[in-house]
Image (spheres, rainbow, N blue to C red):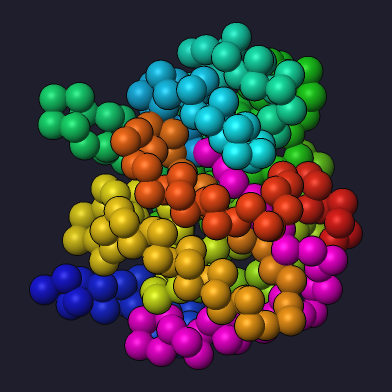
Amino acid sequence: MSKILNLSKIFFYQPKNILPFSLSYFFPNLFNYKFYKSFDSLKLNNNYFIFSLDCDTTEDLKYIPKLHDKLSRQNILPTYAVPGELLLKDVTLFKELKKKGAEFINHGYNLHTHYDTKNKIYLSTHFYKDYSDSQIEIDIKKGHDTITEIFNEQPIGFRTPHFGTLKSNKKKNLIYKVLTKLNYKFSTSNTPIDSFWNLPIYKNNKGLFEISLTGSFDRPHIILDSWNFKFANNRYFAEDDYFQQICKIKKYFNLKNTNILINIYADPSHLKNWDSFFESIKLLQNFKNINYSNLIEIIK
């Protein structure tokens, strides 16, 4: 049954993405070869690793301080993608993280996930795919203004809320148009499927860099995020599979002569009691941890 549900996703993709999705599903090795071979063109001077935290619920606020310190002990400085509405719930916390060197990117304004404490499940809301053009523009600008007001610094990067559900090229182009007007330099809202016909990091038609998230090795269309491995309905992977996926990616590139970027994220509250996740990212200690702004300086 779950296989039928996964295959049904093909029909939700734009026509140009049906082939990469099919390759990812049926022939992941071919997909990986094409996708990662693309890094040759980028000529990165090192293997890089970006770790971002999507802070979508008030549950995340409870865990962030402890998590940030834990990551610091592993020499990882995360980037934070936080809706403006959540930033305003604990300005002191986020200002302290900024002082510690954390990067913040615009993640819209509206809270778009709710944690049901009774049933212990996460409920997603406020999808851009359901927003009108004006609602999208307002949400982006309100998120932008909130970050600017709190940190006295304008953000230069953006991640679309629930980005994997946004398939419309028209709405993606609208987002890029809004970001361009706000002088943004990058977006990190693409899955490997979305970037298949380009490069994993490329300039879109508005002159913004799009930085693709990293997919799983065995199912490249499934990104390496905490939701897919811990909470998604009918999920293909289990929690402990995360470690194996990172192992496989690292082993693959130990055999290649290509520098790559691994770009992964998690929701802070998802990481509670998930020891194998932290063991997984220890495998990336020989990758250079940077943030998105650092990367843009390297590749521009």
Residue located 74% across and 28% down the image: 101
Q: Depth check: give the residue in front, 118 or 96.
A: 96
Residue 196 location in percent, x, y? 58, 78
Q: Is residue 226 above or below residue 258?
A: above
The residue range painted magenta reads: 24-53
Q: Depth check: give the residue in front, 70 or 229.
A: 70
Instruction: Check the picture and name the quadrant holding the N terminus.
Output: bottom left
To which quarter of the image does residue 94 belong? Answer: top right
Residue located 61% across and 60% down the image: 262
Residue located 20% across and 24% down the image: 117
Q: Depth check: give the residue in front, 261 or 107.
A: 261
Residue 179 location in percent, x, y? 71, 45
Instruction: Check the picture and name the quadrant holding the C terminus.
Output: bottom right
To which quarter of the image does residue 114 belong? Answer: top left
Relative side of 233 to 59, left or right = left
Relative side of 221 to 263, left or right = left
Relative side of 89 to 102, left or right = left
Instruction: Report if residue 31 lies within the magenta region.
Output: yes
Q: Is residue 285 visible?
A: yes
Number of disc labels: 0
Residue located 21% across and 36% down the image: 121
Residue 23 location in percent, x, y? 43, 87
Q: Is residue 81 visible?
A: no
Q: Is residue 25 above or below residue 157?
A: below
Residue 91 location in percent, x, y? 59, 12
To which quarter of the image does residue 100 belong? Answer: top right
Instruction: Report if residue 278 lies within the magenta region.
Output: no
Relative side of 1 to 78, left or right = left
Q: Is residue 199 above or below residue 203?
A: below
